[in-house]
Image (cartoon, rainbow, N blue to C red):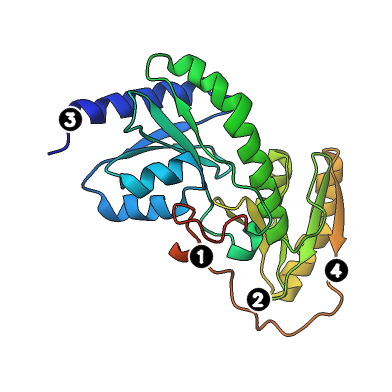
Amino acid sequence: MHDHHDTERLASYADVLAGDLPDTWTSSHIPADAEDDLAELADRIWDLDLVAASLAEHPLHQAAVLSRPDGAQLVVIDRHDDDGFLIAAVAPRALPDDAYRAVPEPNGITLSADDPFLSAEEVAGDLLARYDSALAQVRHNALGGLQPSQVDRVVLTWQPDGSVATAPVDDRAGSILLANGFDLDPQSGIYRISADDTQVQARALREIGPQLEAVGIGTALQHRAARTAPTAAPAAVPSAAAATRTPAARGR
């Protein structure tokens, strides 16, 4: 039977860790009886090193997920060869497998059970920095390899299905996009406006320029070489075959 003390210990540690990381993070606990949730989470753990090795020997029996408003997630799990914990990055659900090619895995690290405040410093200075870098690269790849947005410049790009997508850096830009008909995928951080109504789409693209400029943000619209009929299927959810706990596709 699962040890209730272990559950409380992990959940409490993750709560403290989340509260001491830079930016805003929330913590949620996934218990042992949530088998489907644990299996889905294990398939998205972005690691080919010590966390993957641990999962190969000890399948998840509980986990604590740390979440940031932009969709970034970290997972804290028990460490079975010591009294501490392991923490790893979680890959977004919504990005296609191709986006992960040639992106190094932001492999996880060990955490001391005695000092979650020191652990937060280690996570911020090591894992989180590598995760943010890898996350920016896969989001960039998912947008077709075009130049990513910057704080003072939003790059919009035509997609094969006729939609227009972007991943703005600044929350001010995100608010303007949402107000003009863009939809946000919180897992990927990508804002998209469909081509279901091209007049609505064109009006939105006209109107966001002056609104962004008013807050000091420029825009750039990247066109594809040739527009085609909107026949492309939506991006696939990464499959279990791409899961990092079985050294396969991510980053390869």
Label 3, on which residue? 4
Q: Nearer the viewer, residue 51 or 237?
A: 51
Label 2, on which residue? 196
Q: Earlier in the sequence, mark 2 or mark 4?
A: 2
Q: Which of marks 4 and 1 is nearer the N terminus?
A: 4
Label 4, on which residue? 223
Label 1, on which residue? 237
Look at the numbered discs 2 and 3 and tell me whether their residues touch, using CB distance below 8 Å. Answer: no
- Give the residue at x 84% y 40%: 152
**Residue 171 x, y percent position in the rendering:** 68, 39
Label 2 vs label 4, nearer the camera:
4
Q: Earlier in the sequence, mark 2 or mark 1?
A: 2
Residue 195 — which label? none
Work out whether 19 lies above or below 148: above
- Assign a secondary structure to mark 1: loop
**Disc 3 from disc 1: Cα separation:** 34 Å
